[in-house]
Amino acid sequence: MGRKKSPVDPPVCSLCEAPAVMNQQYSRRSLCSTHFINDVEERVFQVIEKKKMIRAGDRIAVALSGGKDSTALLLLLALHLPKWQDVSLIAVTVDEGIHGYRDETIRAAERVAENVGVEHSVVSFQDLFSDNLDTLLKGREEQACTVCGILRKKALIEGAKKVRATKIATGHNLNDEAQSVLMNVLRGDLPRLVRNSGIDTADSFLPRIKPLAEIPEKEVASYLFVKGMFLLLPECPYRGFALRADVRSMLSGLEHRNPGTMLRLMESRKKIEKYLEWEKVSGPLHRCRQCGDPCSGDLCQVCRLLLSLAR
Amino acid sequence: MGCAPQPTHQDMKIILPDQGTRVIERGPVSVEKMLHELRINPLEVIVSRNGTLVPENAVVGADDEIRIIRISHGG
Ligand SMILES: [Zn+2]
Ligand SMILES: [Zn+2]
């Protein structure tokens, strides 16, 4: 109608005239729901291809907590699956045994897997470590995320082995990755700082891939929301205990005031990685005398932890 | 929420991340400004207007139902 644009006019997509649902600060674009969904799907596919994350013959265990990241990951992998030859998916959920939290998210995970027609398998702390997380943590709740992180990683590997997977895919997004970089810097943990990128085989024979590692958290959530799959689930009761909680809010504050902070953080890791001699940082690789897993010392992290918890 | 005031025609209803509801009388305001006034980092939430996702530069106002959803995850 040739009407003058007023500030109340809804922002429109940079690629078409439809109303925008998302501003991508780093690309200086606004996108409508269709173009935004295409953009996320395309970028995830590109990352997988560029880093050769998936090959013919792969059986990918998708770590499915039922939360937004892993749900988005499963949707995206299932969507692209027909493009890869001779590749199959299986969703694996770890039941830590966290009262008032896990039951609901496991049901959510079951529904998602069923929705996309992917086989689903659950592996529990109780079965693997003969106790649930709540019991293991009695009196040491402040260590919750460290303990849970180590055991969950182990549980996921065991769960993936059980279903004869060749790789594990996790839903870590750009924020998670940037938080990890910063946390490892704050802890002075150089080996871990450089270990987690790309296809990581450092602590098991099963390579791990992170197809969402370049997608900001807000876009992962928006993607699910636009697809009508965003669920409000209970939050983990232990989450406040972690250093990560501080790093998370600090980093999102920085990113808000200085867009691109997270990407630059990832760039600095890449540079460190490039000039680093891995052998010098990690030391020689040993085998755990208890379980035989590759590790840097006498006992692996999991066996050391289980020993200390048994005391 | 039974004691919340009935929205009049010019009111904007905001559903907060903690599930609380606030009805404010407010002229048109950008999502960014609204979040700023509520001291919420826009990167930690997504915002919908009447059920549709809106970007931070969208202007919201009278008769809109705004939902602010926290996106942080628990594993
Ligand atoms: Zn568009
Ligand atoms: Zn061991």
Image (spheres, grey):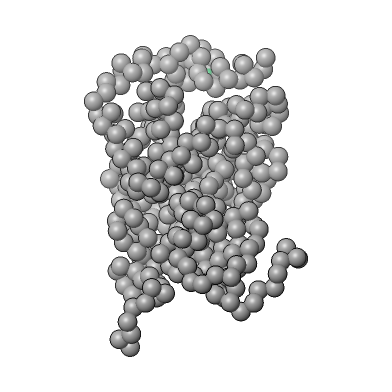
Q: Vertically, is B25 above or below A255?
A: below
Q: Quadrant of the N terminus of chain A?
A: bottom left
Q: Name the quadrant containing residue A142.
A: top right
Q: Name the one closer to the observer, A14 or A211.
A: A14
Q: Is residue A88 visible?
A: no
Q: Vertically, is A307 above or below A2?
A: above
Q: Name the one closer to the observer, B70 or A280.
A: B70
Residue A269 position within the rendered picture, expressed as x and y whole percent measured from the top left = 31, 32
Residue A231 left/right relative to A192: right
Q: Name the one closer to the observer, B56 or A40.
A: B56
Residue B62 position within the rendered picture, expressed as x and y whole percent measured from the top left = 54, 75
Q: Vertically, is A89 above or below B30?
A: above
Residue at the far left: name it.
A275
Q: Is residue B37 visible?
A: yes
Task: Name which residue lies at 62% across and 51% down.
Answer: A233
Task: Name which residue lies at 55% across and 22% down.
Answer: A302
Instruction: Give the total of numbered labels.
Output: 0
Q: Vertically, is B64 above or below A245?
A: below
Task: Name which residue lies at 57% across and 48% down.
Answer: A66
Residue at the far bottom: name it.
A1
Task: Name which residue lies at 54% across and 46% down.
Answer: B73
Q: Name the quadrant containing residue A204.
A: top left
Residue A292 position within the rendered picture, expressed as x and y whole percent measured from the top left = 49, 18
Q: Quadrant of the C terminus of chain A?
A: top right
Residue A119 position within the rendered picture, expressed as x and y whole percent measured from the top left = 54, 49
Residue A13 left/right relative to B23: left
Residue at the far right: name it.
B2
